[in-house]
Image (cartoon, helix red, strand yellow):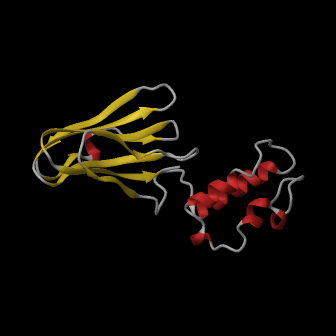
Amino acid sequence: MPLPFAPKPDESKVYQSLKEKLLTEITADQFDSLKETVYAQGVDGAEDEYRRLLLLGLASDQISSSGPIPGTGEVVEVTGLTAGATTTLKAPDTGEVYVIGGMSGAITSGSGTVNFRFRIDDDTSGGVVYVSDFNGTAGAVPINEPSTFSPLYIDSNLTFKVETSVASGTPTYSAGATIVRVR
């Protein structure tokens, strides 16, 4: 039931914007774009629009009140690396929050030893936290299990990166991780 001054549901900006879509067709990006059109004023029916956003987000699995958003998991990877570098794996957009899962590095061709240092950079203060460090000599080497660390979250202020250096030889290598959007 709408609040006294709220527009009727069929006049709602939330419902009008996506009325041709099934709930299963709504993406997280479409939902975020819709949120950007609702003012945070709390008057003239805005409170009902907040409720409608919440209901639509929960019903379409595009927001979560308890954990990962279904269908948003991905592997972020950099491949074909041949020299020491610091490379971005994920830089979330405004409003996005991701949890980082397992990380790994691999020598894909050649021989030698590669040092992998996964890190989270604070883009506002310039701070850096190293979250995993290892060196590998051949094949894929998982370097951390989700159960061995606290959940690692990144948002638009934090960038997830991998810093690599070749300790010996001339290998070609890759590094990656799993991430899942939680907001």
Q: Position of residue 147 (x, y in %)?
A: 27, 44
Q: Quadrant of the N terminus?
A: bottom right
- Residue 161 or 6: which is nearer the viewer? 161
- Residue 111 or 104: which is nearer the viewer? 111
Residue at horizontal 72 percent and vertical 58 percent from the top: 52
Horizontal side of 44 relative to 49 (left or right) equals right
Q: Position of residue 83 (x, y in %)?
A: 24, 42
Above or below for 7 versus 40 = below
Extreme-right residue of the structure = 5
Residue at horizontal 30 percent and vertical 51 percent from the top: 176
Residue at horizontal 75 percent and vertical 50 percent from the top: 38
Horizontal side of 160 relative to 125 (left or right) equals left
Above or below for 20 versus 9 = below
Above or below for 114 versus 34 = above
Horizontal side of 96 relative to 30 (left or right) equals left
- Residue 137 or 11: which is nearer the viewer? 137
The quarter of the displayed image where residue 131 is located = top left
How many numbered circles are shown? 0
Residue at horizontal 45 percent and vertical 26 percent from the top: 126
Q: Position of residue 15 (x, y in %)?
A: 75, 65
Horizontal side of 3 relative to 122 (left or right) equals right
